[in-house]
């Protein structure tokens, strides 16, 4: 007796991942930015309120970011770490 089984299923890796490891979208949310910066949303908001980061566009009460804005935040964060303003994680 022979039992024929179907070929195993392998999920194809996501091809729409950008160079920051996020799914490619037109706009990103605070949680996406925090994932890249490796900080909590509360820490992110505090840094905006204290003037370390610029304020960004909001839709209602939610901030939205472009990929270029996230890259700008990375550069700002790296500079502030080099200057000793932030501790590196």
Image (cartoon, grey):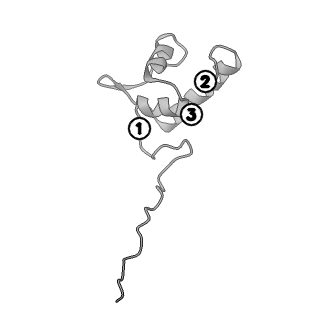
| Left/right of residue 81 with respect to residue 8 in the rendered view | right
For image coordinates 42% across by 44% down, the residue present is 25
- Up/down of 7 relative to 73, above or below: below
- The residue labelled by disc 3 is 71
- Label 2's element? helix
Q: CA distance from mark 3 to mark 1?
A: 13 Å
- Up/down of 23 relative to 77, above or below: below
Q: CA distance from mark 1 to mark 2?
A: 20 Å
- Up/down of 82 relative to 29, above or below: above
Q: CA distance from mark 3 to mark 2?
A: 9 Å
Q: Position of residue 67 (x, y in %)?
A: 50, 38
| Left/right of residue 3 with respect to residue 11 in the rendered view | left
Q: Which mark is residue 42?
A: none
Q: Position of residue 7 (x, y in %)?
A: 41, 75
For image coordinates 59% across by 29% down, the residue present is 74
> Are there few (<14), some (14-19), or many (20+) residues within 10 Å of tag 3?
some
- Label 1's element? loop
Mark 3–mark 1 CB contact (< 8 Å): no
Q: Position of residue 8 (x, y in %)?
A: 42, 70
- The residue labelled by disc 1 is 27
- Label 3's element? helix
Q: Residue furthest bottom?
A: 1
Q: Which mark is residue 76?
A: 2
Of pointers 3 and 2, the one earlier in the residue sequence: 3
Of pointers 3 and 1, the one earlier in the residue sequence: 1
Quadrant containing the N terminus is bottom left
Mark 1–mark 2 CB contact (< 8 Å): no
């Amino acid at each position: 007796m022979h039992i024929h089984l179907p070929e195993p299923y392998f999920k194809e890796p996501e091809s729409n991942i950008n160079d920051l490891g996020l799914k490619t979208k037109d706009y990103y949310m605070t949680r996406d930015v925090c994932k890249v910066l490796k900080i909590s949303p509360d820490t992110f908001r505090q840094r905006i309120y204290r003037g370390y980061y610029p304020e960004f566009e909001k839709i209602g009460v939610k901030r939205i970011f472009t990929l270029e804005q996230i890259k700008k935040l990375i550069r700002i964060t790296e500079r502030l770490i080099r200057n000793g303003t932030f501790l590196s994680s």
